[in-house]
Image (tube, rainbow, N blue to C red):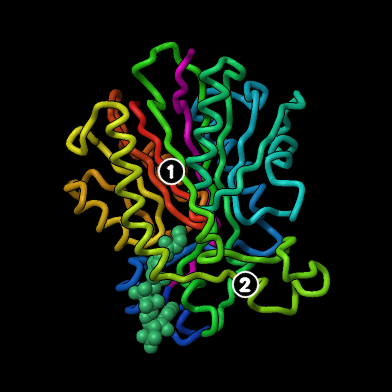
Amino acid sequence: MYNSKIVGAGHYVPEKIVTNKDLEKLMDTSDEWIRERSGIEERRYIEFGKDTTANMGTKSAKIALERAGLTADDVDFIVFATLSPDYYFPGPGVIVQHELGCKRTIGALDVRNQCSGFVYALSVADQFIKTGMYKTILVIGSEVQSNGLDLTTRGRAVSVLFGDGAGAVVMQRTEDNNKGILSTHMHSQGEFAEALCVKSPGNFKETKFYEDMHIDYDYSTCLMDGQLVFKNAIVRFSEVIMEALQANGYTADDLDMFVPHQANLRITQFVQRKLQLPDEKVYSNIQRFGNTTAATIPIILSELWEKKGIKEDDIFVLAAFGSGFTWASALIKW
Ligand code: UT7
């Protein structure tokens, strides 16, 4: 058995910055409310017709490959996590295979686990590398949220939180079993599926796809029971991090960096307090990008790569919670 390790990370966010003040012009909200409740100051939105989920994934993948000193032809497999695909089907993984110009018809898999999507995708890639099936895998998280947001007062409880962006990592095998992805841990609790969901397009029992999808607000817009999500998130984040630490004989004191999914700064701070981590060991960029769902963690990994924020042998934990409910963690030794 091999281990897998991250050998390159890249990200791409659209140029257009949308501040809380910009949103004040569209709906009854305030910069103060958004900052206090979520920590968000601004987010990025795509320029319609210019960027898509798939092509932002490709852009970030190209950067990750370059930083890894590899080319598209080195990639054996693609795993793509998103809740906002270009098409209802096929998923964006195949579009990346094409846009990267891969000479080989490598496989591409799409992961549907929303905020936990990237950690799930990383785990899938890790298993393929561990068994020796593939040597080099691209793992991408990318989202265009702005297209599906209700930017009126009716949608404010959801729409102020989300932004667009993409991140990618390249994973490769290592024969050092003490390095790379040490373990991954995934969970779900489907009884809460409707606490954070978009029902259409889908084959949900009460909907008729073509007749209802554009006309019924409750089916085509993101519905979220924010407080229920919040309460579950703070419990599950802490649990799944402890699970990862305990599985490897570590404690929170051993962590060099906590890389949380960026859903709400208050969630991150709650977990930080519980783990008693100092500020310099917790990464947050929600202030600049909002919640970019499956893209948040790879964007952070890319920023850390750029800042040389991760050193050889650093121990860090990735953790995410979101729609499903699903939650997951990965413990990594760099
Ligand atoms: O990525 C994973 C998925 N998402 C999450 O993890 C989100 C988890 N939940 C949260 O982050 C928080 O619940 C929110 C940030 C979504 C909301 O914060 P909250 O402190 O739970 O606020 P609330 O939903 O209890 O709403 C408080 C008030 C309400 O007004 P009333 O009923 O007290 O008069 C809302 O109608 O704030 C109102 N409100 C807003 N006001 C201004 C809701 N959205 C807004 C808004 N601007 N954008």
Q: Is residue 145 left or right of residue 55?
A: left
Q: Is residue 36 left or right of residue 9?
A: left
Q: Is residue 286 left or right of residue 9?
A: left
Q: Amino acid at mark 2?
A: Thr
Tell me the crowding category of disc 2: few under 14, some 14 to 19, or many 20 or more residues within 10 angstroms, Cα based: some
Q: Amino acid at mark 1?
A: Ala
Badge 1 element: strand
Hey, which quadrant is residue 32 in on the image? Answer: bottom left
The region drawn magenta spans 1-19
- Looking at the image, which is closer to me, 140 or 304? 140
Q: Main secondary structure of the magenta part?
A: strand
Disc 1: which residue: 328
Does any portion of residue 282 appear in the rendered image?
A: yes
Q: Residue at x 43, y 43 (%)?
A: 328
Q: Residue at x 54, y 21 (%)?
A: 129
Disc 2: which residue: 221
Ligand 1 image position (quadrant): bottom left
Pick whichever of labels 2 and 1 is earlier in the sequence: 2
